Image: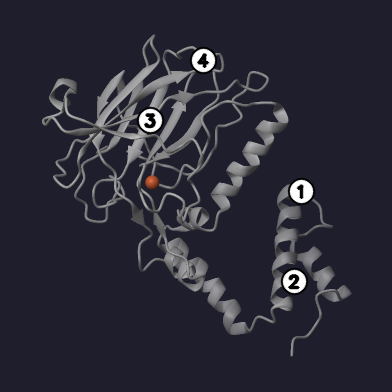
Amino acid sequence: MGVNIFDTAEVQNFLRVIANLDGEGGNPRVKSVVHRILSDLFKTIEDFDLTPDEIWAGINYFNTLGSQHEAALLAAGIGLEHYIDLRLDAEDKELGIFGGTPRTIEGPLYVAGTPVAEGKARLDKDPDPDAAPLRIRGTVTGPDGMPVAGALVEIWHSDSKGFYSHFDPTGRQSEFNLRGAIRTGADGKYEALTTMPASYGCPPMGATQALLNQLNRHGQRPAHVHIFVTSDKFRKLTTQFNIEGDPLIWDDFAFATREGLIPPVVEKDDGRAVGFEEDAYRDIEFDLHLTERVDGKDNQIVERARAAA
Ligand code: FE
């Protein structure tokens, strides 16, 4: 027995008052967005006849989410972060920018401050006997296909348990384990010796998983490696590649998988020659194609709260 009051002058005026739409000062953009979001929320409450109990459950959800520092995780899980990518793709299309490595979500687990190495880096600082050796290598190229010197390739990924250093709930990993920052030389090449990442999921008892449970969705990601590429001349690239063969590749709770981001995994046996302690390893070649700036500006720099060590 829902009541209909949303379209009354009283409620419509109330929404304008809440956002101070007709008042002086404040941030006009924030006022407009707050007005719109609250209008959509009030309308949703009316259309679904949400009970006070349900509304308070939603309000308390935000407290839980924040206390668990899971807001950015939820943003990935509800597709908000992928939606940003879809909008950036469409903007690029409108600007006539094609041909770069596909972008995909950053996720919440980057850590700034990883020491920079020239050309090549060892990422696995801690022993992880359950993780096979992995070499990641490739060339950073510009829009003309030529190698980019001086590009900074930042790489981060999980250990065999699916945990990231700095965020590992077991406290087992040392600072910057499985994180690297590699500066390309004149040949544009980067190389990282590391270990295979594992698939992982949302904390099972966390607020993000609690919402996913209500949707009958899992909170798991396929194994993947995160990458930033920055340079003086071209736009920043934020991307990831997936580990080929992972059963979750097209069933990622964060919607990060994209065509072009699933490079082949090649089994090799000259590990000692390339710097590993054993001969068998996996090799992934993943070139990184950068795109032209827009009117000289890098419009791909995203400001958001990030961890630093
Ligand atoms: Fe990740």
Mark 3 → mark 4, Cα distance in angstroms: 21 Å
Q: Earlier in the sequence, mark 2 or mark 4?
A: 2
- Left or right? Give the position of 55 relative to 244: right
Callout count: 4
In the image, what residue occupies the spot 72% across and 54% down? 33
Left of 92 or right of it: where is 148?
Answer: left
Which one is closest to the eye, mark 1 or mark 2?
2
Task: State the image coordinates of residue 140 (x, y, percent, origin top left).
Answer: 44, 20
| Residue for badge 2 | 43
Instruction: Pick whichever of labels 1 and 2 is earlier in the sequence.
Output: 1
- Give the position of the N terminus as an image quadrant: bottom right
- Which residue is the extreme one toward the right? 9
Q: Distance from label 1 to label 3 (Cα)?
A: 37 Å
Which tag, 3 or 4, sits closer to the chain's start? 4
Q: Nearer the viewer, residue 84 or 276?
A: 276
Task: Check disc 1 and report its element: helix, strand or loop.
Answer: helix
Q: How many neighbours does mark 2 have within 10 angstroms: few (below 14), some (14-19), or many (20 or more)? A: some
Measured as percent of width and height from the top left, residue 16 is found at 81, 63
Q: Give the mark, 3 or 2, whose residue is nearer the N terminus.
A: 2
- Secondary structure of residue under mark 4: loop
- Dot label at residue 28: 1
Q: Is mark 2 within 8 Å of ligand 1?
A: no
| Three-letter residue code for mark 2 | Lys
Q: Which residue is mark 3?
A: 154
Q: Tell me whether the residue at label 3 lies in contact with that at label 2, contact meaning CB atoms closer than 8 angstroms.
A: no
User: Foreground residue, 186 or 100?
Assistant: 100
Q: Which residue is depicted at the point 20% across and 44% down?
A: 131
Specify which label sits upstream in the sequence, 4 or 1. Answer: 1
For residue 133, above or below residue 305: above
Q: Which sits in the foreground, 140 or 155? A: 140
Q: Amino acid at mark 1?
A: Pro
Residue visible at 35% across and 66% down in the picture = 204
